[in-house]
Image (cartoon, rainbow, N blue to C red):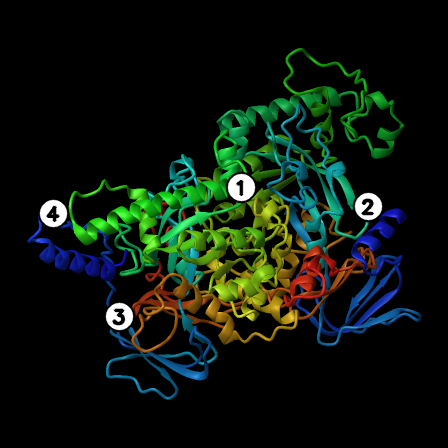
Amino acid sequence: MSMRLSFVAAAFAVSLAGCASTGDKLAPEPVNRNPYPSTYRAYPGVPTLLRGATVLDGEGGRIDGGDVLLVDGKIQAVGQGLSAPAGAVVIDAAGKYVTPGVIDIHSHLGDYPSPAVQAHDDGNEATAPARPEVWAEHSVWPQDPGFSRALANGGVTSLQVLPGSANLFGGRSVVLKNVPARTVQGMKFPGAPYGLKMACGENPKRVYGSKGQMPSTRMGNIAVTRQTWLQAQAYKRKWDRYEREGGDMPDRDLAMDTLRGVLAGEILVQNHCYRADEMANMIDLSKEMGYKITAFHHAVESYKIADLLAREGICSAMWADWYGFKMEAYDAIPENVALVDRAGACAIVHSDDPNGIQRLYQEAGKAMASGRRAGMPITEEHAWTWLSANPARALGIFDRVGSLKPGKMADVVLWNGNPFSTYTRPERVWIDGALMYDANNPRLRPVSDFELGQTGQGDVK
Amino acid sequence: MIRSVLLGALLVGTAVPVSAETIAIVRGTVAIGDGSEPIQNGTVVIRDGRVVGAGAGVAVPAGARVIDATGKWVTPGIVAGFSRLGLSDVDAVEQATDTSSEGPFSAALDIAPAINPNGQPVAINRADGVTRAIVAPSVGKSIFAGQGALIDTGADLDAVTRPRLFQFIELGETGSEQAGGSRAAAHVLLRNALREAAELGRALPVGASRSDEASMDQRERPVVRNPNESRDYRGNRSQDVLLTRFDAAALVPVLQGRQLLMIHAERASDLLQVIALGREFPRLRLVIVGADEGWTVADRLAQSGIPVIASALSDLPANFESIAATQSNVGRMRAAGVKVAIGTINDDDTRMAFRARYYAGNLVALAKVPGAAGLSWGEALAMVTSRPAEAVGLGGEIGSLQAGRRGDVVIWSSDPLDNASAAETVLIDGVEQPLATRQTRLRQRYQDLSPGVLPQAYRQ
């Protein structure tokens, strides 16, 4: 829950309390919807002018020979011939590209961290198929060295960390700023809404079927999912009435709290789902139960129903070229991203991988090249929306990040070449205007506690 | 073979591979694959399935089919330096996967019969310019995975170029686990196995040639060609044996240096143990796979002369044997004189060998990062062509466009180490290959979603 949302809830509760004071009923007590609040604070930066770059603004715009001015942690201006304020650092970016930072909508950094030992196996609460009560942030280990690789090699400035897909309801996701911190609270993206990880297909039915439990089939998946939502609807009715009218506080249920948040439109559904037919089932299910699916993740068959996804306004988070690792990935094709995009649906390139996140920009490059070869003209400035504006929208943070628009957070990458190419690397990365990585400065290279004092500490990685 | 080609044509509906012809690819940017930089306006000539010559000023023979590669790049086919290509159609489908065995045998396992040349991963990698693959089994219940092969990715059923090319074993964390939970146990298991092999091998004169071997009594032939044979080995075995007779027999050629011993190890100390093993058993022909921490002992690896097939971009402490992993590993080992190549080690190795060329491109990019060790373009291409071939002793056969090599040639739309490029023509043994896959068919079927007069299932 965002801070803003919880504010509203609190204010709502207070006003109701005023009305209820004359009746017999007890006034409703507000529930703290943000008990683990972000403590992230932007690090200090200096006014910085990037001059003469190819600027891809992240929402489809491009300026050749463009300037980007960062002041007080925000994008202050984007254009040509900008003048530098007094004391600003001016960087000659001719021949280079400037983009908004990469946003990975699907990561397990922190909840499946490196080293991948069993003691770190914190991504799947695979003890019941519906576990909406767990929150990924309570598994995230901020010392995962993977965060630093995603920053330095991948230009990743924000990411969503999700629970795994063993469960139909995997739990809440968390959106992080990719800034090292001692606590996960120190990384939490201020005000970002929560997500709910859901899953369909092979994983839940395999995990529970192998234990002799329901679900063991796809129809079992759907049945358990529906039944759980019915429970959530009843819970929501009870709590809505309480918050309206007061009285005895109903029992709180953490699982149902999360689902109620979805039904109220406050928590965004991030649905792991591969096959076209299963996505269609989930769309009907969401309508039956009264919620909206924000994005399908790993949607390898979105190209088969791109028209439906466009109509429903559901994003697809996809890989460029993964295929064949499981039965439900058998029909993956490298033109998936481009075909979804061409249909007017929201296309996102995601990683789900601690290595892939370091090359998400190259994955977008592959997806763009595959689309072009299949006859779809895709510009670079448009393709960058797959890494910034579109994931930002699907995370509910597009008003803050995801494009180089004045007033947005200055999450910016300077690339040493074309940012879709295998030949290109991030040269500098700013988060909220603070320079968090500089390829030319070994002191601007984060080293996690885990790597401190080990061979290779502080090495280029 | 003929039947399979016809069947393939029916299923795929594309050009049937014709027999090897004389082909001249002209006016392309030609990269030999031996580490040299690309040559503008070069020519590549292939005859009788082999490269006749490549470079500038190579004459086009009369009667050759001429392919104009203006604006294109021409390279040897990509060699998957370490993979499980052909062993799985769908990884998570047990019945479609033959990478490892929980059965009674280990070292005796020969991966060749498990290769499925009709599987989609083979076709998809072929269509992306991977023409050969070094294919290893995975371990099941032992440190010995069995015998790996070199395959081609051609659209026919004769995939295996060199069966039983190497024995593959695990000596790092995985080896420790297989041996019962300790590296010490893995090393004792290995030495015991070599002892048992030596005992069996005594029947065979040390250094016996293949022809000697062929003339021997079948029952005395220590190379197990088919573990299902009920061959009687008369060689005396002592009572204290752990290995099955077949497994021990499979290690005889390893011990005698007639079959490569490929060892997976990542940790610096494990790599030094492999080097020590080479000193202890001087006849072993070792190849190291992995070596995430190789850069920390690069001088010693170089001195040992043991080839290393490494992961190009491994840079996370994914486990405690890879604490020092960095993308600069390959560049640093190369600079120190290690014979290094790139493979996809436990890296979607059944399917994604085609990524190797992007990995090579990333190593070129590293050359621009201060403090990092990258590669020149020519050297990066060699890492995915000639170097893996050389690592398994087949540098004279595949992996480059030098005269005499097999005619595995790819024409690319542009620079193959950049991710915007695609393979446009693929030759294997001089035979042009079909590049259509299920993926291209699916794209064609669904690229237009407007309702037709019949369902999509009728579009083919």
Q: Secondary structure at mark 3?
A: loop
Tag 4–tag 1 contact (CB < 8 Å): no
Comparing labels 3 and 1, the label whose residue is closer to the camera: 1
Residue A389 % position (x, y): 42, 69
Dot placed on the residue nearer the N-terminal end, 3 or 4: 4
Task: Please tell me whether residue A330 is drawn above or below residue B110 in the rendered image.
Answer: below
Comparing labels 3 and 4, the label whose residue is closer to the camera: 4
Dot 3: within a 10 Å radius of its alpha carbon, few (fewer than 14), some, or many (20 or more) residues? some
Between B276 and A288, which is closer to the camera in this rendering?
A288
Dot placed on the residue nearer the N-terminal end, 3 or 1: 3
Tell me which amino acid carries mark 3. Gly
In which quadrant of the rendered image does the C terminus of chain B lie? Answer: bottom right
Comparing labels 2 and 3, the label whose residue is closer to the camera: 2
Task: Please tell me whether residue A314 is drawn above or below residue A76 in the rendered image.
Answer: above
Tell me which amino acid carries mark 4. Lys
- Residue B158: which disc? 2
Q: Secondary structure at mark 2?
A: loop
